[in-house]
Amino acid sequence: MVRIRNLHFGYSRKRPLFQNLDLTLERGHIYGLLGKNGAGKSTLLKNIVGLAFPDGGVCEVLGQPAAKRLPAVLADLFFLPEEIYVPAVTAAKFVEQTAGFYPKFDHDALAHYLSEFEVPAQAVLTALSFGQQKKFMIGFALAANTSLLVMDEPTNGLDIPSKAQFRKLMATALTEERCLIISTHQVRDLESLIDTVVVLHGQRIVLNADLGELAERLTFATVPEAGPADLYAEESVRGAQVIRANRGGLGGRVDLELLFNALVGQAPALTAYLSQNQPAHEPVL
Amino acid sequence: MSQFFSLSRFGRLFNKHTTEHAGAYAMATGVVLGGLGLVLGFLAYMSSSTIPPDVQSVVFVIGMLGAGAFFTSTVLAFFGDKKQATAALMLPASHAEKFAVAWLYSLPLFLAVYVGCFFLVDSLVLQLSSHGKPAEMVRLFGGERGLHTSLAAYAAVNAVFLWGSIFFVKQQFVRTAFGVLLAGALLVFLNFQALQALLGHELGTAVPFSAMTLHEGKENYVVSLPEGLGDWFGLVPLGLMLLAWAAAYQRLTEKQI
């Protein structure tokens, strides 16, 4: 679905954002792309959808170079940026004029999504609040039924009930044929939604792993005091939050925030542990 | 389906563009009608008889080049806004189709609307100011004062401002106009200096792609290409026009956010 090899990119030659970045994303997954502010999450997504061109390396989507922006590829790809643009037409008119560009567009599904989000179809889009506009565009993006759906910070601007609705709708939208990529710096928004976590840090992908596999290898706990066997620990008001090797083999819940903090901080023990028998995807860490 | 140009995709894109910009274009047409009405009405009021065809021609050409250059500067200007550019670039249509919609609106459709507006207002003003006497209206085609050559001049202006509308990310009209003036002045200056250095003579005038005049004592000489060959200079604006359109299209294909 998405194949990136040896990607080099930077807005300035002196300060490259990505160097030798490799990433493979497959159908049938919801990927959560995590990274600190300025790590290049949005830029990576722009490279994937063809809005930014690599300085070097390969960036292919659906078997075609993304930078070509071929209509056939764009018809099977939907990109929802963090800051959206809506024209001054009604939602119904927008759908009438735009849905035809997407061969697999599902009008019934759109009606369902808009009803769930409580977005009026006859409202002029520019007259809606930013949150309402975003919900409309999320509904449209899901209804477009494209094989690749890329969302950059989709929950920004959504109220708390809408975030829950968003997670529910995203989960129902995933099929074996689709690949969904969600970038965010709000890790909590992705919990119980994504099945694969991708962490971007230090100009490269430092983790691209299935959450189920991570849960089988790691346990996350809050303990009174961290021990020497812990792979990572950080202090909190309730004690020490730790990441440990999962010796029992039973998968628990992956604390994405703790894992992310460990990966972008100093956690050599965790790094070494995850590097052993890497379960899937990229050569990480 | 062709990945370069598909008529059905183009039609869909054209419809979408028209729907989303219909209000703004209707207002712009109103401004053109009002502006022409004001200028022609003022001229008719100030003249003792009806407006002469020569004056009508001047109003037609200045209005067309001015309004056309300004309008053309807006048709691809939204690519300067990240949000709008993202939506436009991600729409499943080819770059050629996206360029063609802008070209179609800024050249043939603009000309059709402008010419229609001009002759509508002109005929009304002539009728009202002639007081029953016959009044001569300027002709678009044919005759000594036919305006059709100015349509070709507009095509060249369109090409330059279309390029400017995507090359610059803001203030497209002002920046393109300034760039054109600067480039023109630089070309005239460098051409003059180069020719003077080559000939070792004091030159009178040396306009690029044209004849030049020399001073030899008290005599003035004109150096120009033999008759017939000079017509080839007509291809220069045509070449520049095609080059500017190609550059605007290329810029669109290379657009990044």
Image (tube, coloured by chain):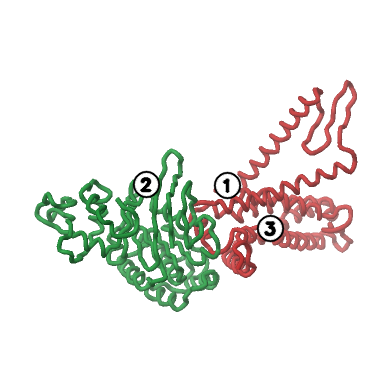
Chain colours: A green, B red
Residue under circle 3? Answer: B32
Q: Is A118 above or below relative to A159?
A: below
Look at discs 3 and 1 and give the one toward the viewer.
Answer: 1
- Say which of A107 and A14 sits in front: A14
Residue under circle 2? Answer: A203
Residue under circle 1? Answer: B168
Disc on the earlier residue, 3 or 1:
3
Q: Is residue B232 found left or right of A70 in the rendered image?
A: right
Marks 1/2 in contact by CB < 8 Å: the verdict is no
Query: Disc 3 versus disc 1: distance between alpha carbons?
Result: 25 Å
Residue A169 drawn at (x, y percent): 36, 72
Residue A258 drawn at (x, y percent): 22, 55
Q: What residue type is labelled 1?
A: Phe
Q: Is B253 above or below relative to B25?
A: above
- Say which of A252 and B37 sits in front: A252
| Residue drawn where x is 34% and y is 55% of the image | A282
Query: Disc 3 versus disc 2: distance between alpha carbons?
Result: 53 Å
Query: Disc 1 versus disc 2: distance between alpha carbons?
Result: 31 Å
| Residue drawn where x is 87% and y is 23% of the image | B216
Q: Which residue lies furthest to the top in this view?
A: B217
Q: Residue furthest left?
A: A224
